[in-house]
Amino acid sequence: MTVVFLEEAKLELLDTISHYEGAHRGLGERFRTETARCILWVADHPELYRLRPGGYRRINLRIFPYYIPYITRGTFLWILAVAHGSKEPEYWIRRRTGLHG
């Protein structure tokens, strides 16, 4: 699968890496590594996670309190957000409309 980040999701990832790196040196890189590991896993197993009522799937990070919602369209895996688990639920849900691939 070809992984595509929505611009908002990419910015969330970079902001979170920066936040963690500012809190403790090396923690941002640890967040980046865990996120990349999860995305690679999902790219190889996109149907493994249950389809949710909003028409998306998600994977929870193991160490950090974040999750990555995604959808698949053809051979594309669209990353919709890098979302904190306690933020407003599904604040990013409108991002899934209009995706193609």
Image: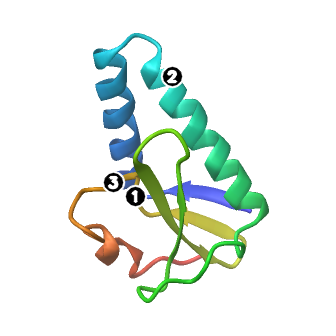
Q: Residue furthest top?
A: 25
Quick one: label 2 or label 3, which is nearer the N terminus? 3
- Res 39 label: none
Q: Quadrant of the N terminus?
A: bottom right
Marks 2 and 1, how far apart at CA: 18 Å
Residue 72 position within the rendered picture, expressed as x and y whole percent measured from the top left = 62, 75
- For label 2, the residue is 29
- For label 3, the residue is 8
Marks 2 and 3, how far apart at CA: 20 Å
Secondary element at image label 1: loop
Quick one: label 2 or label 1, which is nearer the N terminus? 2
Task: Look at 36% across and 19% down and name the residue there.
Answer: 21
Q: Residue furthest right?
A: 44
- Coloration mode: rainbow
67 shown above or below 58:
above
Can you tell which of label 2 and label 3 is closer to the viewer?
2
Residue 79 position within the rendered picture, expressed as x and y whole percent measured from the top left = 50, 60
Task: Look at 63% across and 56% down and name the residue there.
Answer: 3
Secondary element at image label 2: helix
37 shown above or below 44:
above
- Res 81 label: 1
Foreground residue among 54 and 75? 54
Q: Quadrant of the C terminus?
A: bottom right
100 displayed left or right of 27: right
> Looking at the picture, which amino acid does disc 2 mark?
Glu
